[in-house]
Image (cartoon, rainbow, N blue to C red):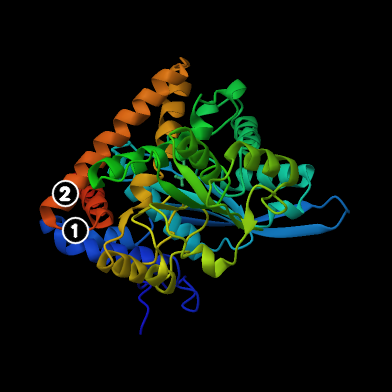
Amino acid sequence: MTINHGSLSYLDPARPEPWASFIEQIDRVAPHLGHLSRWIETLKHPKRILVVDVPIVRDDGTIAHYEGYRVQHNLSRGPGKGGVRFHPAVALNEVMALAGWMTIKNAALGLPYGGAKGGIRIDPRTCSQAELERITRRYTSEIGIVIGPDKDIPAPDVGTNEQTMAWMMDTYSMNVGHTASGVVTGKPIALGGSLGRQEGTGRGVCIAAREAGIRMGVPISGARIVVQGFGNVGGVAARIFRESGAKIIALQDAEATVANPAGIDIPAALAHVAAHGSLSGFFGAEPVSEDDFWQIDCEYFIPAALEGQVTPERARRMRTKIIVEGANGPTTPAADDILHERNILVIPDVLANAGGVTVSYFEWVQDFSSFFWSEEEINARLESIMIKAFDAIWQTAQERRLSIRTAAFIIACQRVLAAREQRGLYP
Ligand code: GLU
């Protein structure tokens, strides 16, 4: 089998994933775009890629260099928008794919943004707070030439949090000479952050699951749910699912995989992780093997960790009715086909995890107007944007007899490529 990673000479052909998955998803949608398919190559060519060296003095006095990226995949519909990831596996092909998915996600939800993403190849767990601050500040300064409140607005992703955003906001502000709160979202509330932002992604996952459940006759209340990833997405989603009457019967984080058929006490699991850093050693559930985890009988499976987790091999064995993608890119295109054949419904990342960037949009708007909304208002607006997008995507999927992912990509690509066409090519 040949793997198509596009024709980009700067990509390492030995490591095509996950950009190759993104390209395949774009290829699958192209035949459904009518005359706009003429512009499809736009989506296979990121607009702008910045690779930066991030040198710091470590606490022991040695000097370390890290590789950092900011990719602006598409800016046709507005400024770039997307998170910054600190993880040892960050690579250019990954950041490109993540930026591409942001273009699709923002357009699918109707947010006035293009798509961007950034990252540093580093294991933040091996760094002190002081080292993380130096790394974040130097990285921000290096990408300062391409970011800004009306150019490209970073946010948290895997391995970063509101403290990272506070340092990014401060560094950018110091460099431009005034406080620019709108340069990043996901900030602490005291610095112009938004109520509901930290929970936004997990809350959105639960809204997407509930909407799918209503249409499929699989109510959340009483459902058995398996969650992979127990951080800002999986942890919040598990808690809200539990509050809605579901039973979380298995959890996996980077260090442990545990199950309890009677339902895991989520507040206890969250307290354990807060105290010990991972699920390892949590007494409220039994350890299970990786193999068993992927074949637990359940109604909902929520991959909320990293990309490429639902492989064809796992897709053949999963025993769930509905997959709701909390992570970005967790399902490979080949696995998607298998799940489709097996009648397992997939609510794709670009819809299911869009609650985070939707509340980021609210944060950015609030920063611009310096007028802050109540949490009730934020959650109500989040519900309304997500339900509207869900309805439109679901309807397209039904009418054209396509997967929800392809339907989401159709709506998003139509919006991006129509903007591209109307703006025209410069010069
Ligand atoms: N990192 C999140 C995502 O993948 C949020 C991005 C944002 O808020 O800009 O959607």
Q: Camera-side residue: 42 or 409?
A: 409
Q: Secondary structure at mark 1?
A: loop
Asked if residue 288 can be seen in this view, the reply is: yes
**Does residue 198 sit above or below 212 in this rendering?**
above
Marks 2,1: beta carbons within 8 A: yes
Q: Quadrant of residue 222?
A: top left
Q: Camera-side residue: 223 or 29?
A: 223
Residue 202 in the image: state x and y as whole percent.
47, 39
Residue on which the image places disc 1: 402
* Category of crowding for the residue at label 2, using alpha-carbon neighbours closer than 10 angstroms: few (below 14), some (14–19), many (at least 20): some
Residue on which the image places disc 2: 396
Q: Quadrant of residue 52?
A: bottom right
Q: Is residue 237 left or right of residue 254?
A: left
Residue 56 in the image: state x and y as whole percent.
76, 52
**Does residue 41 sit above or below 385 in this rendering?**
below
Q: CA distance from mark 2 to mark 1?
A: 8 Å
- Which amino acid, by three-letter code, is at mark 2? Thr
Q: Is residue 277 left or right of residue 380?
A: right
Q: Is residue 185 left or right of residue 54?
A: left
Residue under the image location 44 percent in, 55 percent down: 98
